Image: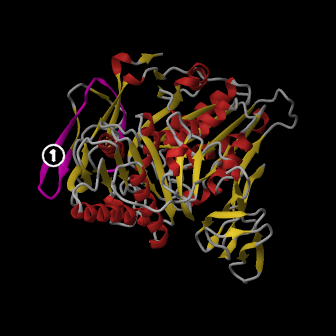
Amino acid sequence: MKEELLFQIDSLSRGPMSVKAFRFGVPDATPSCVIVGPMTGNAIDQLWIASHLVRFLRQKELENAGFVKGEILIVPTANTYSFNMGKAFWPMDNTDIDVMFPGYDKGETTQRIAAKLFEKTNNYDYAILLEARKDHVECVPYVKILNTENSDVEDARDFGLDFIYQKDVDPIDTVSINYNWQVWNAKSFSIISGKKGTLRKIESGKVIDAIIRFLSLKGIIDYKVFQGAKGNIVTKESIEIIKSAAAGLFDALAQVGDHVAHGQPLARIYNALDGSLLQTIVSPSEGIITCRYDYPLIFQNAIAYRIAKLSNDY
Amino acid sequence: MIEEVFNVKLPVNETLTLKRNRFCPEDITTSTKRISIVTGIHGDELEGQYVCYLLGKWLNEHPEHIKGIIDIYPSMNPMGIDSITRGFPFYDVDINRIFPGSTSEFLPGQLANAIVESVKGSDYAIDIHASNIFLRELPQVRISKLFADTLVPLAEKLGIDFIWVHDAVTVLESTFSHAMNTLGTQTLVVEMGVGMRITKSYGQGLSEGILNLMAHAGIIEKKPMRVCKTAVSTLNSNVHFINASTSGIFVPTLEHNVIAMKGEQLGEIIDPLLGCVKESILSPCNGLLFTIREYPVVYEGSLIARILEENKAEKQ
């Protein structure tokens, strides 16, 4: 393992923000894979996953120098400043680094961070972003691929996760690192999991296993793995969105990953002042809960659950 | 006439409501023109509040001059305005990056959708922004090249200092203005002043400009003004961006809204701990200093100033 300083951003009053990376295997060997950790400072699950992948690979490489057959670069995070003060986005101006790609080396600070990060990560065969959802939900681990000419569902199946979300490209996606990696011919994926601001070790462990499985099946590491799931392809159309009709205290009865039946109670909403029951949210279809609203107070019309509907199309 | 265009209950005994004030003549026909004045999408940008007030005041005082429909939407992000927050609080989302939204999206997307559905059908819309808290901007209209042919002549009616025609950028397709222009409402974006503040002279100038535009469009009965002071930038290369090369405290040398000469000092980045100047910021060209940094703390890359190069600007 080689520890590298990818780049550094200086501050007037704080120590410099040093963005570190960990390189495994033989430089320029193929196949190669880059894994980039979270760019938002509240994605604790993703930081855990990135750091434990570094730990896993370091230990395996110490046991067997030929363990990594290709090349792997892991950047645990490019936004240590936000992690250190409990903020999601860039502390100075609240901008999101992951809407600044491919970056601009003469632009604003977060454009420059994006440019430096992109320059160091855009020449790999496979590129994986560890991403937390930006809305207030907890979700099952899943692979997100953007529908572009270079996207490949079959590659995504090698993670062995239950769900692969095939997302149409929105304008905002065109400035994400995932999209821009693809423009530069990498096969890129986002692995999304957990709940921001917390550590879900079991769910994170599934993601770590999935990435190790992927690296193994792609011949990047020499490691035997169990088979994972085939991967159910879901699109916007195959997700049932369940909204709250009332606002108040949100009591979730069903959890992410649960298989729920049509008509099954999912949550209750109570008046926040007098405790009266305002709504029992019931499932409109049979399927698996992929996302659940994660805050105990809920707005009216907020998305309380997303359910992958059971169908024969997977 | 105050109308509610979106309602959603909040968790603890409150309802979030978007409101508009509609001014219209007694008789409305299919040929009656309609304009929507929208502001407050970013909750920390308040310059538009004063413009809405001035327009409402004029319309209240001159009901006999109203020939079309004028909808004023002063607060498209009420919780943001109430908490000095740019985005939609709780979700921490920039509403102006999620248009047109939809009813099946999360709450900010539903709100964006409600704004679009409400404004849809207007002949014209003006989306008033201040700058953020970091920069002070001369009043300007920003127009994507995609819509320049139709929007530049409209923007000229505002008599504003500067029309900036910029390249079409994919990510900006998720803004309010792009959504409305795509739907056939000619929509202008105005940027002026600085975040969290009101610059009265800018507000007065823009409200007069909007009245003038409405007069030209036949929405109000008022003698149109002669417009003469607009400078048009039709190419991105006319605008120079000056970014900090180092972190520190920026102290401006020049005032906003002056002609800077090539090589002239715009300001300095200083280090209060060491008591030294870390960088002297110089103008790269002769031109109008239309953006200057307001918030002193800078990182490498922080925008310090923007200059419209003088010899390339097309004066009218």
| Helix, strand or loop at mark 1 | strand
- Measured as percent of width and height from the top left, residue A168 is found at 60, 41
Left or right side of A218 for B163: right
Q: Quadrant of residue A136?
A: bottom right
Q: Residue at the spot x=39%, y=54% of the render?
A: A216
The answer to which of A196 and B216 lies nearer the viewer is A196
The answer to which of A306 and B209 lies nearer the viewer is A306
Question: Is residue B271 one of those drawn in magenta?
Answer: yes
Is residue A310 shown above or below A33?
A: below
Q: Quadrant of residue A169?
A: top right
Q: Which residue is mark 1?
A: B278
Q: Residue at the spot x=78%, y=49% of the render?
A: B1
Question: Is residue B302 one of those drawn in magenta?
Answer: no
Observer able to see residue B132: no
User: Which chain letter goes with mark 1?
Assistant: B
Specify the farthest residue to the front: A224
The answer to which of A246 and A308 lies nearer the viewer is A308
Is residue B158 shown above or below A273?
A: above
The answer to which of A61 and B278 lies nearer the viewer is A61
Q: Residue at the spot x=77%, y=74% of the render?
A: A280
- Measured as percent of width and height from the top left, residue A120 is found at 29, 43
Q: Please provide the residue range marked out in magenta.
A: B269-295
- Measured as percent of width and height from the top left, residue B198 is found at 49, 48
- Measured as percent of width and height from the top left, residue B40 is found at 58, 49
Is residue B156 shown above or below B248?
A: above
Observer able to see residue B17: yes
The image shows a total of numbered marks equal to 1
Magenta residues, dominant SS class: strand
Query: Mark 1 belongs to which amino acid?
Result: Lys
Mark 1 burial class by Cα count in 10 Å: few <14, some 14-19, many 20+: some
Q: Residue at the spot x=26%, y=62% of the render?
A: A58
Left or right side of A205 for A109: left
